[in-house]
Image (spheres, grey):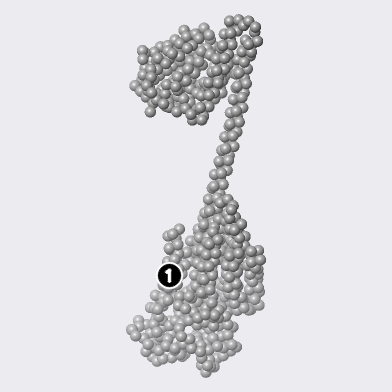
Amino acid sequence: MLNLCRSLLLGLLLLVTVSLAWASGFVTERAWVEDPTGQMTLAEAQRAPETPFANKYFTQGFSQSTFWLRLHIDPAAITKPLASNRLIIRIRPPIQDQIQLFDPLHKDDEARLTGDYFDWETDEYQSLNLNYVIPVGQAPRDVWLRLRTNQSTLTVIEVMTVDEVRAADRRQEMGAIMYLAMLVICMGWGVLSFIIQRDRLVGMYIGRELLAIIYGLVMLGYFRALTSGWLPAAWLDPISNTLICLFVTYVIWFDSQLIRQFKPNPWLYRATLSLMLALPVEWALQLMGKAHLAIMLNSYIVFAAILLVFITALSTRAWRETRNAAADQKPVISKTLLVGTYVVILIAVLFNRLPAVGLVPMQEGLLYLNLVYALVSSVMMMILVLVRAYRLNQRQQNAQKHLEMAQLEIAREQARRVEQSNFLKMLAHEMKTPLSVVRMAVGSEYPSPRINDMADRAVRDMNGIIERLLQVEKLHDDQLSIQAAPFDLIKMVYQLQAALPNANRLQIEAPAALRMESDARFVQIILSNLIDNAVKYSPSDSVIVLKLGQTRDAALLRIENDIGAIDAPDPNCVFDKYYRSERAQAFTGSGLGLYLVKVLADMLSGQVRCILLGQRICFELVLPLANK
């Protein structure tokens, strides 16, 4: 963005320097004569009182009078050798309607005319400007120009050598190309932004820049040159005037729509919009043959519009009303940036329009300020819309993030509800049988040893469920952390065997010792759940085989038992939380044992898997010997 601004500034400076082109001092005297009737002849103009003007700039504002401009050319003022005996009268801007040349050295009766009433191909010297070719001559002489225009009479008249004109034209063309390129860049940015994000204001900005480019083509002379040969010369001036008025009207509409978002004073906003009604009036005046009044009205509309838009921007109250609101409810740009933009545009308009209407003298470098205004306003609007689009995009991204977080939270809440539902179902189902046994034992006056044994087993089952629930809760609350320490895995296995009611059912095949450095609590929970699962779901008279071994860096455990009368579990679901096969529901359990085995094995960087071997089931566990 910084590089783009630098390039725009460079092009702006280049454009301004075009009007500072140095010319030889062939013209030693300048004067003008006003012809209010437009019927004065050359002879009458030569006899009429003159008003001198000091430099190459002539302006009498918007006047319906015809003006005769006298240039006194003195060949003696030439201080260097000339490559040609020709001089060029170079006249800017190229939108002047009709200029006629009277040179005493030109003896033909043919009228020498130029302007945007005439085809570009008829110019004596073709460029972006209006030009005449005259001889140097041997003696001083007066050359007269008859100016008649519906535009501002602001005209720059220079007499230069052919080489000077060519050099000045190259500089002018470079500046014009740079100027148009910058407008195209602004519009291109708008198109790209609109493709990415279909913002209505950006779409309006694209239309604004398209009209700004057309306006630049008209004011720089490209429109006259490009339409030569196919557009009738009589159409050139009306079309040019229409495009200029349309550009001004569209800019008023765009600015009002931009400021509308920041809650301006309603009356000022309506007053700004009302200026757009000048466009049909201007078109009507042109159709009535009063193009001069249409162009003058348009020029004063520019004054009124920029002042009114500036005041309307000052009246905005969106920032005051949202002072205590959340960040995403505040305006996307600051009031300083908005008002500052219109301050810059106001200055550019005043510096150009005041000389154009004849209120202040024309100064060097101000001729192209009408174009500089269009460029400055385009750049400032691009920055304004860019900041707005960027911040709107940020807000949309933040809103999307909040939406995703809300959706994630909803999903989590739903998962928690499902978890609670599953937990309550499991608890209600698994506690019912043990509690019935305990109630039966408590209600018996003389409980038998068998009833006492059943009650004891029921209490152990409930205790096991509660213990697993507590372990899972700690796991979810991140209260379980690895605390590695050396221990003997074989010794732990035999201790777990000794705690079983029927210890002889567990057949162990293991080496004398197997040292590990890991979290003994986690390993004990894993082994006890695997052994408990095998004991509970295998036939009571079957043997459970537990084999232990090791590789270079891992302990290998394999526990295998008969499936018995219950259904074989699904190996893909056996480690899921609360999962139990259909016939396993006949046994008290929580469906958390193997879930804990899987989670804790993963925490210890181990692996566990379930394998079905016909009517037998096997669990294989791999744990690293040293947990880092």
Asked if one can make out residue 448 in the rendered structure from this viewpoint, the answer is: yes
Q: Position of residue 208 (x, y in %)?
A: 56, 63
In which image quadrant can residue 152 be found?
bottom right
Please tell me whether mark 1 sits on a helix, a strand or a loop.
helix
Q: Position of residue 178 (x, y in %)?
A: 45, 66
Q: Position of residue 227 (x, y in %)?
A: 53, 71
Q: Nearer the viewer, residue 553 or 178?
A: 553
**Which residue is located at x 36 percent, y 19 percent?**
515
In which image quadrant can residue 249 be found?
bottom right
Q: Position of residue 507 (x, y in %)?
A: 44, 10
For disc 1, the marked residue is 14
Q: Nearer the viewer, residue 55 or 342?
A: 342
Position of 129 with respect to 244 (left or right) is left
Position of 278 with respect to 112 (left or right) is right
Asked if one can make out residue 137 in the rendered structure from this viewpoint, the answer is: no
Label 1 is placed on what type of residue?
Answer: Leu
**Which residue is located at x 51 percent, y 71 percent?**
348
Q: Quadrant of the N terminus?
A: bottom left
**Which residue is located at x 56 percent, y 45 percent?**
400
Is residue 137 shown above or below 375?
below
Other-residue count near label 1 (Cα within 10 Å), few / some / many at <14 / 14–19 / ≥20? some
Name the outermost residue toward the front. 445
Is residue 203 shown above or below 591?
below
